[in-house]
Amino acid sequence: MSRQITESSFYQLIKCPNWVYFDAHSAEPKPHDPLLYKLMEEGLVDAHERAAISDRVDVAEVTAEDPDDAFRQTLAFMREGRTTIYQGVLVDRHWVGHPDVLERVEGSSALGDYYYVAADIKRGREVRDEYKFQGCFYAELLAKVQGTKPVRGYVITPDGTTLPYEIEEFEARYKLALDDIEEIVAGKRPVHFVTGACKQSPWFSECVKESNACNELSSLNRVWNEEVLRLKDAKIETIDALASKSIHDLRRLCPDLQAGRLEMMRDQAIAIRDTHHIVRKSVDFPESSIEIFFDIESNPLRDFDYLFGVIVVQKGKEKYTPFLAKRPEDEASMWKEFVGFVESHLDVPVYHYGHFETDVINRFAAKYGCSDLVRDALRENMIDVIEVIRRTVVFPLTFYSLKDIAAYVGFHWRSDDASGANSVLWFEEWMRTGDKKTLDKILDYNEDDVRATRVVKDWLVKHT
């Protein structure tokens, strides 16, 4: 049982408030792998964090593992006036902060004619709300430690760019979040509401089990909290209650909600109640004698997109081809090979699942370049299967990830522990050991993702 509040508590609150509760009140904690924590909180592996601050001079690194010892070491460095403190720890009562970087700036504090500001090294290239919550937490801790509160927080990107934000502009929201965390840690159970973000919590299975047992409206796919509250105001408090309503009744009871949303939520409730999908309209995929299915593997901990996997289907036969970059410096050559592949398949539909593949393709095209012919082909031929699903079929599922949908239609991954997060850990293991079996496991996982995309697409064709 831990009543400690850290910068991670704010991340957990945003993703799943019950994560904070279970961590604080469960007799047996469920810790994540340290790399998974970095992955969840948009961090980088140590080598890349160090590279992002490699231009700093007079860097003092806190090495103590015990939080109290680490705080004493941090405080000693601060009193010495070291320019940059890496991996510092700030403590005040049950608050413990772990800023990646403390940077000395000119000014006045209990330390002398200088004080420290905090920064975190993140792979995100914009300042997100969860970063600001953490920065406000560091600022409050620094105010208690050095007697001066910083007015700005900072995020350092993988290329070393520093992004500032004003603490005061976000402080009101931070105070409300901190109050919520304090109440949860003290024993108040938060309102239960399952979202896709809950999947990142080690307590996810408990959340889903509780939600299903209670027949909760949050089991609807992509439902907003405001919509659930509005339905409850109309005395529609469960999946079964929603499924039993006519559209006419729903429009009368909830006139402020869009009719299209009411119909979609009602259909989702029926699908979940009856554990069977509902076809809303037929799919309209392009006719082609050749089809391509596509999936990308990335290692966010290294800011590295390392595998473009494709399956080409022709005359009922499929062939898997991986385009692999074994090191970050190989990305350009991997992209060149992939572009060559696209040039030989200019008029072929390319199926993928989710917007991630499109985002990476656009980023690589901007970074490494490609012809207008290839750019146009990718823009016109890429088909996002999940977007097609949302227009055509309602599944009896809370989540519509590839893993969830493919499992529903009968596909099975070869590895029992197949997941995007585990693929990152496998890649880190392969980078560390060079073990070919680990690399083969990654390739198998990617191939299964691509094959799953094909299975889902073919199911849609057959069943709609």
Image: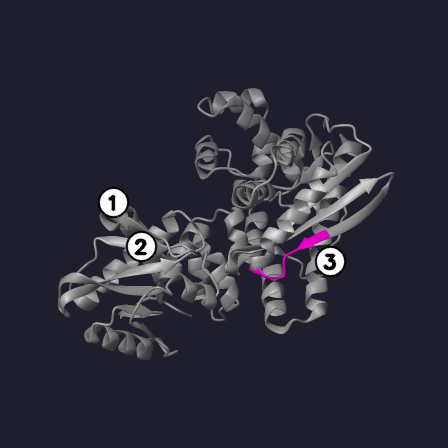
Question: Considering only order in the chain, which callout, 2 or 1, is on the residue closer to the N terminus?
Answer: 2
Element under disc 2? strand
Tags 1 and 3 touching, CB below 8 Å: no
Q: Which residue is mark 2?
A: 154
Sequence-wise first label, 3 or 2: 2
Classify 10 Å Cα crowding around label 3: few (below 14), some (14-19), many (20 and above): some
Do the residues bearing badges 1 and 2 touch, measured as CB atoms within 8 Å? Answer: no
Looking at the rendering, the stretch of residues picked out in magenta corresponds to 322-328
Query: Looking at the image, which residue is at 72% across and 26% down?
Result: 284
Quadrant of the drawing holding the C terminus: top right
The amino acid pointed to by label 3 is Asp
C-alpha span from label 1 to label 3: 47 Å
To which quarter of the image does residue 109 belong? bottom left
Which label is found at residue 444? 3
Whichever of callouts 1 and 3 sits on the residue coming sooner in the sequence is 1
Compared with residue 90, is residue 289 higher up or lower down, i.e. above or below?
Answer: above
Residue 453: image quadrant is top right
Check disc 1 and report the residue beneath it.
Answer: 169
Location of residue 397 with respect to 140 vertically, above or below: above
Decide whether residue 302 is among the magenta residues.
no
**Residue, x 50% and y 49% (percent of image)?**
197
Q: Residue 1 location in percent, x, y? A: 42, 70
Quadrant hosting residue 41: bottom left
